[in-house]
């Protein structure tokens, strides 16, 4: 592998590190508190991150095309690749840690939303029961429609 190839590899790793840093910044900027509005914000957050992860996947595909040999690993330029890889690992670890916290919050939020949906469903069933079985008269109130 030539120095030109190695420089291209360094450029790809830097690009990957930049993309991961972008994801980290997005992740840090989104604080989920467990409010119902978080569900909508999460969708937007997820879409942005997913776009960047797709870009990273393409970068990884390009990186995998390089055949790294022992001579390359011992070169000074490859030391730069190792530094960038360490940065990438740091960014990834931070993202994972924040995601774990957000997952707990979002799981609690989803449980809250499920309970609300169940309550709404129950209210609809009660209302249907009254509509089907009882008639409301302003003078008499509710009375059984079967009588």
Image: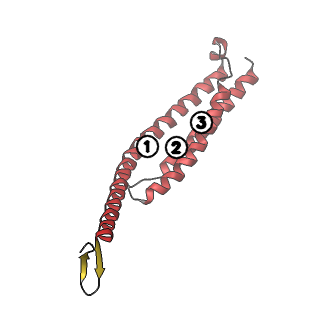
List the residue tagged with mark 2: 24
The residue shown at (35%, 62%) is 120
Classify 85 as above or below 42: above
Q: How is the image coloured?
A: secondary structure
The residue shown at (55%, 43%) is 23
Q: In screen coordinates, is 5 left or right of 137?
A: right
**Mark 3 in CB contact with mark 2 (< 8 angstroms):** no
**Mark 2 in CB contact with mark 1 (< 8 angstroms):** yes
x then y, percent, for residue 147: 23, 75
Q: Nearer the viewer, residue 32 or 91?
A: 32
Q: In screen coordinates, is 19 left or right of 118?
A: right
Among the two numbered marks 1 and 3 on one chain, the one whose residue lies closer to the N terminus: 3
Among the two numbered marks 3 and 2 on one chain, the one whose residue lies closer to the N terminus: 3
x then y, percent, for residue 109: 37, 53
x then y, percent, for residue 54: 61, 38
Q: Count neighbours of disc 1 (C-alpha within 10 A) and say few if under 14, some if 14 to 19, many if 20 or more.
A: some
The residue shown at (64%, 23%) is 64
The residue shown at (66%, 16%) is 72
| Disc 2 to disc 1, C-alpha distance | 9 Å
List the residue tagged with mark 1: 98
List the residue tagged with mark 3: 17
Q: Nearer the viewer, residue 131 or 113?
A: 131
Task: Tell me where residue 50 sits by quadrant.
Answer: top right
Q: Secondary structure at mark 3?
A: helix
All told, the count of numbered labels is 3
| Disc 1 to disc 3, C-alpha distance | 18 Å
């Amino acid at each position: 592998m030539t120095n030109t190839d190695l420089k291209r590899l360094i450029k790809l790793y830097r690009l990957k590190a930049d993309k991961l840093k972008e994801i980290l910044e997005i992740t840090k900027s989104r604080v989920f508190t467990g409010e119902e509005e978080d569900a909508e914000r999460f969708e937007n957050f997820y879409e942005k991150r997913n776009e960047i992860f797709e870009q990273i996947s393409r970068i990884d595909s390009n990186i995998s095309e390089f055949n790294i040999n022992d001579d390359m690993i011992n070169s000074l330029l490859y030391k730069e690749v190792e530094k960038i890889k360490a940065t990438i690992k740091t960014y990834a670890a931070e993202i994972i840690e924040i995601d774990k916290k957000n997952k707990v919050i979002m799981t609690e939020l989803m449980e809250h939303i499920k309970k609300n949906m169940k309550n709404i469903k129950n209210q609809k069933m009660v209302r249907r029961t009254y509509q089907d079985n009882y008639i409301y008269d302003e003078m008499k109130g509710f009375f059984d429609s079967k009588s």
